[in-house]
Image (tube, rainbow, N blue to C red):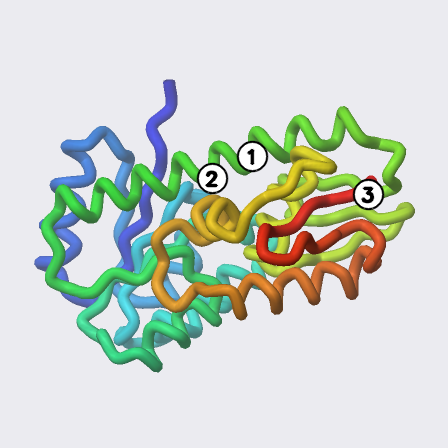
């Protein structure tokens, strides 16, 4: 069985050594880079399952690196955790806006970080399973999901979705007519990430409706949302 690949990008050598040692002990295959530019190049070569990324770095900072990752077809589905000493609200918001899946403030105990890594990888696997079943079961809708290329195909047209919109649609589409509560959506798509609330979900639902049509996503007031074929 192949080990899951973790890429650490940080300009502090001791951080790379310490986290790398603990991740290897947890049976991950670990790669490291000391700046965003080299990290992005390495990510394209090895296609990691998850990237742990610092914010303040030379060459390319973490925000720029994360945005570049999300704009690279082969890396769009790669999980990204920011691990940084920058704890300001605006820094965290900028990280999530760039496409991060989690934002962790240093210092953090290795066991806690590894637990969060496992949680993200598990959630990604669950979403992938939902997506796999979706394509086969509901072709009559005129919409299918290509998780390898991170695309939604509607009436033969390929639509590129941001990561969280893609995951939200995959969740709703996995069980048409089933109502997903806001709590379920938050846990499945965003996990325990801060700054995610009703407004964030509403914005993503609105963007999905703009792309696939109002008639496919229905709101049950006070309850949640469902996908209607």
Q: Position of residue 122 (x, y in %)?
A: 40, 35
Question: Which one is in front, 185 or 101?
Answer: 185
Looking at the image, tell me whether mark 1 or mark 3 is earlier in sequence order.
1
Question: Which one is in front, 213 or 17?
Answer: 213
Q: Secondary structure at mark 2?
A: helix
Question: Which one is in front, 221 or 131?
Answer: 221
Q: For residue 128, which numbered disc appears in the image? A: 1
> Relative to 188, is 163 on the left or the right?
right
Above or below 76: residue 228: above
Mark 1 touches mark 2? (CB < 8 Å): yes
**Residue at the extreme front of the image, as rendered:** 222
Picture residue at 22% right of the left edge, 42% below the top = 114
Image quadrant containing the N terminus: top left
> Relative to 76, is 149 on the left or the right?
right
Q: Mark 3: give few (<14), some (14-19) or many (20+) Cα within 10 Å.
A: some
Q: Position of residue 78 (x, y in %)?
A: 47, 48
Picture residue at 15% right of the left edge, 64% below the top = 106
Instruction: State how far apart marks 2 and 3 are (Cα).
Output: 21 Å
Above or below 52: residue 62: below
Q: Secondary structure at mark 1?
A: helix
Question: Is residue 75 visible in the rendered structure shown here?
Answer: no
Image quadrant containing the C terminus: top right
Picture residue at 83% right of the left edge, 58% below the top = 213
Question: Is residue 102 visible in the rendered structure shown here?
Answer: yes
The residue indicated by pointer 2 is: 124
Instruction: State how far apart marks 1 and 3 are (Cα).
Output: 17 Å
Q: Secondary structure at mark 3?
A: strand
The residue indicated by pointer 3 is: 143
């Amino acid at each position: 069985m192949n080990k899951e690949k973790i890429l650490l990008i940080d300009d502090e050598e001791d951080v790379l050594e310490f986290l790398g040692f603990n991740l290897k002990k947890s049976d991950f295959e670990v790669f490291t880079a000391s700046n965003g530019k080299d990290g992005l190049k390495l990510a394209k070569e090895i296609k990691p399952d998850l990237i742990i990324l610092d914010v303040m770095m030379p060459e390319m900072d973490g925000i720029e690196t994360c945005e570049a990752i999300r704009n690279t077809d082969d890396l769009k589905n790669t999980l990204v955790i920011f691990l940084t000493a920058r704890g300001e609200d605006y820094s965290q918001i900028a990280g999530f806006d760039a496409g991060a899946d989690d934002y962790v403030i240093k210092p953090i105990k290795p066991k806690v970080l590894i637990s969060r890594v496992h949680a993200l990888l598990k959630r990604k696997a669950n979403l992938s399973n939902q997506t796999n079943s979706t394509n086969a079961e509901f072709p009559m809708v005129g919409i299918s999901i290509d998780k390898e290329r991170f695309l939604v195909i509607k009436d033969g047209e390929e639509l590129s979705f941001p990561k969280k919109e893609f995951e939200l649609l995959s969740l709703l589409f996995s069980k048409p007519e089933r109502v997903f509560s806001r709590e379920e959506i938050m846990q499945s798509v965003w996990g325990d990430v801060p700054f995610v609330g009703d407004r964030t979900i509403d914005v993503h639902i609105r963007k999905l409706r703009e792309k696939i049509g109002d008639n496919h996503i229905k709101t049950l007031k006070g309850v949640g949302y469902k996908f209607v074929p």
